[in-house]
Image (cartoon, helix red, strand yellow):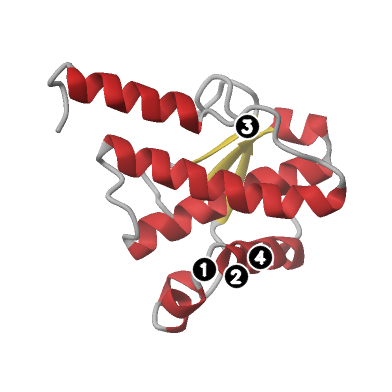
């Protein structure tokens, strides 16, 4: 992938996500995360176009399917995943808790939308409301606090 483009997308995620102050004091933002492109279903969740590596938090895995939609969409997916890299590095959210995961997705989708909209695209289905509902049900069932 083009290093200049990756740097620009990472800079967008930093600024739009409000991580500028964190990045002034952290080496986590010195360079964009490593990006690995994989075939669909290979090292990536089903139905996802991208994800942060579960074993390397400074690596983003993106599927070829994201590029099949188009380069702008793939760039938006990278921005979304770069926000997650910043969330993990900064500790902004308690990502192991249900509501924290929903907040993380909400923020990443919001920044992705900020990137896509001026380029004539939008996210069709944002699953955050479903995540919050699942959290509510799990809390009511006593499965989580």
Residue occupied by mark 2: 15
Please state, as top left, top right, bottom left or bottom right, where the C terminus lies in the image: top left
Name the residue located 75 percent from the left edge and 62 percent from the top edge: 5
Q: Secondary structure at mark 4?
A: helix
Name the residue located 52 percent from the left edge and 68 percent from the top edge: 18
Q: CA distance from mark 2 to mark 4?
A: 5 Å
Question: Which is closer to the viewer, label 2 or label 3?
Answer: 2
First in sequence: mark 2 or mark 3? 2
Q: CA distance from mark 1 to mark 2?
A: 5 Å
Residue occupied by mark 4: 12
- Answer whether labels 3 and 4 touch (C-beta < 8 Å): no
Q: Which mark is residue 49?
A: 3
- Answer whether labels 1 and 2 touch (C-beta < 8 Å): yes
Question: Which is closer to the viewer, label 1 or label 3?
Answer: 1
* Front residue of 96 and 4: 96
- Answer whether labels 2 and 4 touch (C-beta < 8 Å): yes
Asked if residue 89 is positioned above or below residue 116 in the image, the reply reads below
- Crowding around mark 3 (Cα neighbors within 10 Å: few <14, some 14 to 19, many 20+) is many
- Crowding around mark 2 (Cα neighbors within 10 Å: few <14, some 14 to 19, many 20+) is some
């Amino acid at each position: 992938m083009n290093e200049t483009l990756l740097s620009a997308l990472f800079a967008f995620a930093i600024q739009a996500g409000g991580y500028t102050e964190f990045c002034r004091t952290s080496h986590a933002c010195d360079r964009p995360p490593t990006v690995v492109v994989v075939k669909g279903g290979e090292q990536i969740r089903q139905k996802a176009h991208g994800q942060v590596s579960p074993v390397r938090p400074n690596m983003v895995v993106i599927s070829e399917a994201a590029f099949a939609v188009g380069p702008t969409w793939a760039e938006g997916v990278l921005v979304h995943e770069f926000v997650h890299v910043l969330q993990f590095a900064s500790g902004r959210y308690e990502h192991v808790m249900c509501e924290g995961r929903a907040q993380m997705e909400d923020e990443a989708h919001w920044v992705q939308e900020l990137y896509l909209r001026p380029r004539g695209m939008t996210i069709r289905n944002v699953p955050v409301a479903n995540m919050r509902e699942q959290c509510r049900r799990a809390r009511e069932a006593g499965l989580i606090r």
